[in-house]
């Protein structure tokens, strides 16, 4: 079932009234509430945030633009990364979830669009920077999403993308988040190149936690019986000392990534660019 929504858009300096058809909620609603409650302190969200911002800052520092950068955060979720990206330019967030967008508004974020990411209601060549953090795996037609991203990005513009890695790690965590798939490294590289992008940087991230996570999920498959209850993600409150230790361990990867690509990890991080005309 779909619903129609209207919004006003001012990315190009001119307000345009657009009507789009959007799907109803896809991810378990309680997972949005859980994410918002945990993300400001939980090691996974904060370590990932530090890694992403470190890689983002390195690229943006050398990216010259005459005006403030126009950034579109596709699949903006509850808005944590939008807040961080605002230091680099004018950020617009796009998501299909009204729950997620409500959390964005509670942060004071206003430039928000509810829309289907496979048919992004933005004009071609309008964004300097695109971000899609843990989004592509949610979309049925991932090729259509990458093609839409290519369309709306300006020539020579950058896109920053993360996706979950390794099909063998598929678990009820993915089911709870309504993932359609996890990606192998060569598979996602082909998907990105087929959309027309040139790959500037491509690495695994979340390497330090990979062995523990792989063992944890293997043990769950072996010893935890299937339940008829709704699936849940693997995030849960931890003792403060454990959470702090994991945060320190995983966020330290950003220092390694300044010199090297990592050989394995729970996620893939791609920095890609639309070729100049």
Image: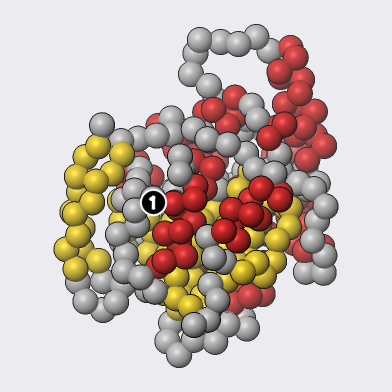
Q: Secondary structure at mark 1?
A: loop
Q: Nearer the viewer, residue 239 or 114?
A: 114
Colour pattern of the rendering: secondary structure
Q: Quadrant of residue 140?
A: top left
Q: Position of residue 175 (x, y in %)?
A: 54, 28
Q: Nearer the viewer, residue 174 or 29?
A: 174
- Tell whether 25 sits left or right of 129: left
Mark 1: give few (<14), some (14-19) or many (20+) Cα within 10 Å: many
- The residue beneath circle 1 is 117
Residue 9 in view in this figure: yes
From this viewpoint, which residue is outermost toward the bottom? Answer: 66
Q: Position of residue 192 (x, y in %)?
A: 58, 58
Q: Nearer the viewer, residue 222 or 88?
A: 222
Q: Residue at x 52, y 28 (%)?
A: 176
- Tell whether 211 sits left or right of 106: right
Q: Quadrant of the N terminus?
A: top left
Q: Position of residue 123 (x, y in %)?
A: 31, 69
Q: Residue at x 39, y 50 (%)?
A: 118
Residue 108 in view in this figure: no
Q: Position of residue 10 (x, y in %)?
A: 26, 71
Image position of 262 with respect to 224: above or below: below
Q: Residue at x 77, y 20 (%)?
A: 219
Q: Residue at x 75, y 14 (%)?
A: 222
């Amino acid at each position: 079932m779909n619903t129609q929504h209207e919004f006003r858009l001012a990315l190009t300096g001119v307000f345009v009234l657009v009507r789009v058809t959007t799907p109803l909620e896809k991810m378990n609603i309680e997972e949005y509430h859980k994410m918002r409650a945990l993300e400001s302190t939980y090691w996974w969200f904060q370590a990932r945030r530090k890694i992403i911002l470190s890689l983002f800052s390195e690229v943006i520092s050398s990216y010259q633009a005459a005006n403030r950068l126009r950034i579109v955060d596709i699949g903006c979720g509850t808005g944590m990364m939008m807040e961080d990206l605002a230091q680099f330019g004018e950020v617009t967030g796009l998501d299909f979830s009204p729950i997620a967008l409500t959390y964005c508004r509670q942060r004071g974020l206003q430039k928000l669009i509810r829309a289907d990411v496979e048919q992004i209601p933005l004009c071609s060549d309008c964004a300097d920077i695109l971000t899609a953090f843990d989004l592509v795996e949610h979309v049925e037609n991932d090729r259509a999403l990458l093609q839409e991203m290519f369309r709306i990005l300006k020539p020579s513009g950058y896109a920053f993308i993360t996706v979950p890695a390794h099909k063998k790690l598929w678990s009820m965590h993915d089911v709870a988040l309504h993932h359609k798939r996890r990606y192998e490294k060569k598979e996602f590289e082909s998907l990105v190149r087929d959309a027309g992008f040139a790959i500037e940087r491509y690495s695994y991230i979340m390497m330090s936690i990979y062995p523990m996570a792989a063992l944890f999920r293997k043990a769950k498959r072996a010893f935890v019986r299937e339940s008829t209850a709704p699936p849940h993600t693997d995030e849960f409150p931890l003792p403060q000392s454990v959470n702090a230790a994991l945060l320190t361990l995983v966020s330290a990867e950003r220092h390694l990534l300044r010199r090297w690509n990592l050989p394995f990890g729970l996620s893939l991080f791609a920095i890609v660019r639309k070729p100049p005309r």
